Image (tube, grey):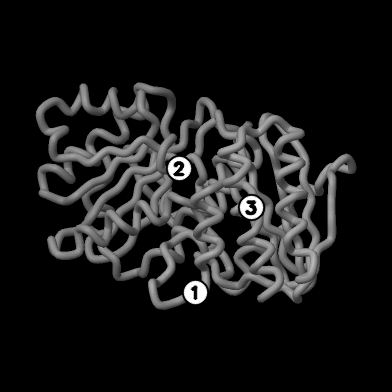
Amino acid sequence: MIATAEMGETLGGYRHEALLYSGGDGFAAATLPFIRAAVASHEPILVAVEAPKIDLLRHDLGSIASGVSFADMAEIGHNPALIISAWSAFVSEQADSGRPVRGIGEPVDAGRSPAALSECQLHESLLNLAFADETSFWLLCPYDTTTLATEVIDEARKSHPWVSDGVAVQRSKLFKRIDPSRPFDRRLPPAPDSAADMAFVPETFGKVREFVTDEARRAGLDSERAGALCLAVSELTTNSIHHGGGVGTVRAWSEDGFVVVEVADHGEIKAPLVGRLPPSTDLESGRGLWIVHQLCDLVQIQSSRASGTLVRVHMRL
């Protein structure tokens, strides 16, 4: 169980902690005390993990499971960029209770594709910007050391200020806060040479939809999801025209059971949480990327002053 002194340090502030555990038994042993402590203290808690682990926890918690909120990570986090809005909503719902809030969220697992894993890791870093230091929220993020590669565990140490093994907890010496002015300054893997592409300007904007529709059909995407993909790309190209220099390039290809489309332009995205939280009803900014995240299975952003912006969306076949 986490040391009492360390538990006291979290009260009244935001705490983001990586929990390193070993296998199914290790998961239960490390998370159950945290959950039971929340229930005993009447602290709201949301546990967002895969369905089999929810079943395991419900069984072991018995009657007190009724005091815990659960969410299937496969549903709320199939696109990792959607998870922050789920946590934000839960914390906001508990604001009037006056009690500290707890959460357990496990977005990183060995079944994620390399692209999805990369987005989960970015999500973990952005969580440190999503919640103010004064927010009374303790978020525990489990990592299975028996299934995850060493470099994935090292990334967890970089994105979490605190690291625990379920018994002892300490500050991470590797922790590094993401630069909020350059949140997407990175290099995505290049598009394959076989990717279809087209350039667009305002006068050829309408042809982008034809291009995406043709590529989606060629890949075997059904009509409903092809329509959703076209809408997402339309939002991106609209952003390019208004905020990305007025011109851009669209590329499309198939990869590992997904249709992938990317839109590149000369703009720069500096807002780290854009598209990850619902846009204000009186503001247009961020609305396009919010829609894109809702429609697509995975969204990746690369953006810097030097290279411009590239937004890559994935739609499962």
The residue wearing badge 2 is 77
- Horizontally, residue 129 falls left or right of residue 199, namely left
Give x and y (percent) for residue 159: 51, 54
Give x and y (percent) for residue 300: 64, 52
Tell me where residue 289 sits by quadrant: bottom right
Residue type at the position of mark 2: Gly
Q: Is residue 243 above or below residue 80?
A: below
Residue type at the position of mark 3: Gln
Numbered circle sitting on residue 300: 3
Q: CA distance from mark 3 to mark 2?
A: 14 Å
* Residue 174 visible: no
Q: Considering the numbered disc 1 on the image, is that residue within a helix, a strand or a loop? A: loop
Q: Considering the numbered disc 3 on the image, is that residue within a helix, a strand or a loop? A: strand
Q: Is residue 42 above or below residue 200?
A: above
- Name the residue located 23 percent from the left edge and 65 percent from the top edge: 12
Q: Residues within 10 Å of mark 3 (few under 14, many from 20)?
A: some
The residue wearing badge 1 is 284
Q: CA distance from mark 2 to mark 1?
A: 25 Å
Give x and y (percent) for residue 281: 38, 72
- Name the residue located 55 percent from the left edge and 48 percent from the top edge: 121
Q: Residues within 10 Å of mark 2 (few under 14, many from 20)?
A: many
Residue type at the position of mark 1: Glu
Tell me where residue 187 sits by quadrant: bottom right
For marks 1 and 3 on the same chain, the one whose residue lies earlier in the sequence: 1
